[in-house]
Amino acid sequence: MTTAMSIGYFGTQSGRQRQRLCHMIRELQPRRYVDLTAGGASIPCSVNQEIGPIGVNDICGYAHLAHKALFATPTIPSNVNFKEMIVEGEQCKPVNGYMTRMVNIAPNKAAGSVIPVDIARHIDGLVVGLNHHGCHLAQVAIGKALMNLCTFRGMMWCGTSTDPDHKYVRDFTWDFIAEKIEKEFLRLRQWHHYRPENIATCLDADDFLKDYDASGDVVYADPAWPWIQGQGEAKKEQDNPYYFVVNVLSELIGCPSAPFQLWTQDSPILQTIEEWARVALEHGAKVFILSTQSSNHPPVELVQQHMQERFELGVESVAGLRGTGGGKWHDYFFTCRLQSVMV
Ligand SMILES: C[S@@+](CC[C@H](N)C(=O)[O-])C[C@H]1O[C@@H](n2cnc3c(N)ncnc32)[C@H](O)[C@@H]1O
């Protein structure tokens, strides 16, 4: 098994889950493995390297840009001397963009816990330059570096840095940030593995499935479930752990996500996953696999009951930790097939 890919994504599935799922996929011998909500894409990355073609979809612009650059673009500009040509060169003229606007927002400024404005202008300039030169993986590297250095698990900005030499993000220098971005770019590049049959899309899963011929595929979803918090909580979209990456980070790196409502506890979640499974199977998928864990809403038992009343259901449970969450949860894979009609 290859090293797990990481784009620093909250909720990335653990090695144990990846192994179990890759084993299931290998046995099923699909034409293509399609991940409807691919996020950090560690499973598609392993399947793509070890088993066969993949389809990677995600509504999040940051995740999509990584998927497109790594799996569905034949080459990554490898002759780019990152430091000379982009970081120090003409292509990186500081401009006022999303990051600059954000650090200039009064409450952020007053808190004194944001990146200095001149560095924010450099980052915005770099995003424009890289986008212009089609060096999308380096745009992702900007997001990954900032997520690692100055967010709490990729869910919100943090004034205290994770770097031992720069305790506060307000002390960052441009050279320091540029070096981190370059390192992330070189790391990400290792996972580039292009296959012409791969596809990468940035759609709501509903829209993806509508027009997709899934004949012979395994279709998988590990959706952005809201957490199972107490009554009355997680009612706002901002409470969803993917809010930051979908709405803030994607825009910052120059690949904004389409307007979209993340799930809250009040969303029609069971109806939506039922619809995803039904459409995938009616469009020819061999099996639809759904992933959830004991910390998610709706509770696992409800999900299981809902799906087994409508599909032929198999259940696999994996105990373990998620990559970035830190907690101990049980993970479940539900395999759904259309019920056979009794004559
Ligand atoms: C739990 S994460 C997936 C994590 C992934 N399995 C991994 O190992 O990194 C859920 C993903 O669903 C995406 N998402 C949420 N709602 C979506 C929708 N309706 N259509 C497509 N993607 C969606 C989010 O952007 C997020 O990346």
Image (tube, rainbow, N blue to C red):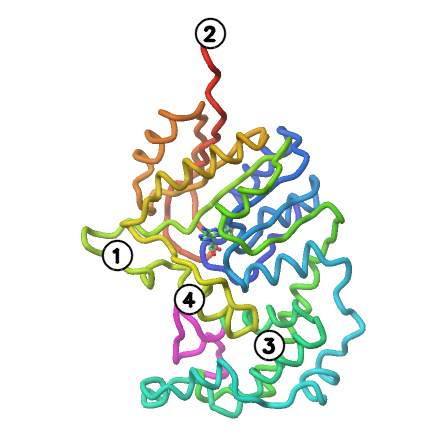
What's the residue type where badge 3 is placed? Lys
Q: Residue beneath label 3, please?
A: 180
Q: Earlier in the sequence, mark 4 or mark 1?
A: 1
Q: Residue furthest top?
A: 343
Quadrant of the rendered structure where residue 192 is?
bottom right
Q: Is residue 160 magenta?
A: yes
Q: Residue furthest left?
A: 231
Q: CA distance from mark 4 to mark 2?
A: 51 Å
Left of 90 or right of it: where is 286? left
Left of 338 or right of it: where is 152? left
Q: Who's the residue at 35% across and 39% down the image? A: 270
- Look at the image and tell me whether residue 14 can be seen: no
Q: Residue beneath label 4, please?
A: 244
Residue 235, label in figure: 1
The local crowd at label 1, few if under 14, some if 14 to 19, many if 20 or more residues have their Cα within 10 Å, is some
Question: From which residue to which does the magenta span run?
Answer: 149-166
